[in-house]
Amino acid sequence: MTRKRGLIASGIATLLLLLAMSPAENRMKDTGGPGMVPFELTGGQDRADEILAEWGEEGQDAARESLWIDFGFLLAYGTFLTLALAATRDLAIRRGWHRVGAIGRVVVSFGALVAAFDAIENVCLLLTLDGAGAAFPLLATIFASCKFALLAMAIAYILAGFAIRLSRPRGATATEDA
């Protein structure tokens, strides 16, 4: 499979799985409680307990459903993100954008790291839903925070690649080390 086909396939899978999670997200919010992201970022057991009480059994069941679907989602978006980062890095190297290419050698791993942090976060949240211990909401918050930070940097790198590509057409020569 080519990178382009991989990007298309993983992009479509990402969108479909995001749509599949939407009903569960809506059911969580219909209980009067928050959606999944505030649960990911509770910071500790006290706030997690508040959210679980707000959700009640129906919202907690919806959260479990969303988390299980999220395992497929994180594989899809992790693949998409890794391929997009690699494509940006490779374009930078081909076009002589040395700094962007050098950054890409590190940033390309962020797609897989984001997905890994998301998976660990999901396990911690499932354990929180099962009342497995006070450490899990805090651990979920730590892994979610790492996930969001790396995701923001990965997206910024891809957007920077797009911006440079638009500002320096294919035939243009790089007079500066981008």
Image (tube, rainbow, N blue to C red):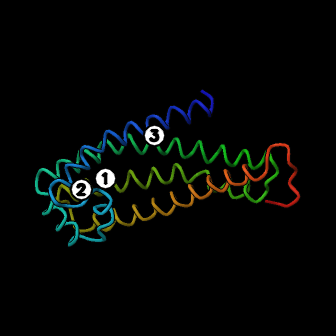
Residues tagged 2 and 1 counted as in contact (Cβ below 8 A): yes
Of callouts 2 and 3, the N-terminal one: 3
Q: Which mark is residue 123?
A: 1
Q: Quadrant of the C terminus?
A: bottom right
Image location (x, y in percent) of residue 52: 16, 61
Report the Cα–Cα distance between label 3 and label 1.
Answer: 18 Å
Q: Quadrant of the N terminus?
A: top right
Residue at 28%, 61% in the rendered image: 39
Residue 129: percent from left, percent from top: 20, 56
Residue 127's tag is 2
Marks 2 and 3 sit apart, C-alpha to C-alpha, by 23 Å
Q: Residues within 10 Å of mark 1 (few under 14, many from 20)?
A: some
Q: Disc 3 vs disc 1: which is toward the camera?
A: 3
Classify 10 Å Cα crowding around label 2: few (below 14), some (14-19), many (20 and above). Answer: some
Q: Amino acid at mark 3?
A: Ala
Between the residue at mark 2 and the residue at mark 1, the CA separation in whole angstroms equals: 6 Å
Cβ atoms at labels 2 and 3 below 8 Å apart: no
- Tag 3, which secondary structure? helix
What's the residue at 88%, 58% (across, down)? 175
Which residue has dot 3 on it?
A: 76
Kind of residue indicated by mark 2: Leu
Vertical position of residue 175 compared to residue 62: above or below: below
The residue nearer to you, when weighing 165 against 116, is 165
**Count of numbered tags:** 3
The amino acid marked with disc number 1 is Val
Image height of 67 relative to 102, above or below: above
Which of these two is toward me, 161 or 75? 161
Quadrant location of residue 106? Answer: bottom right
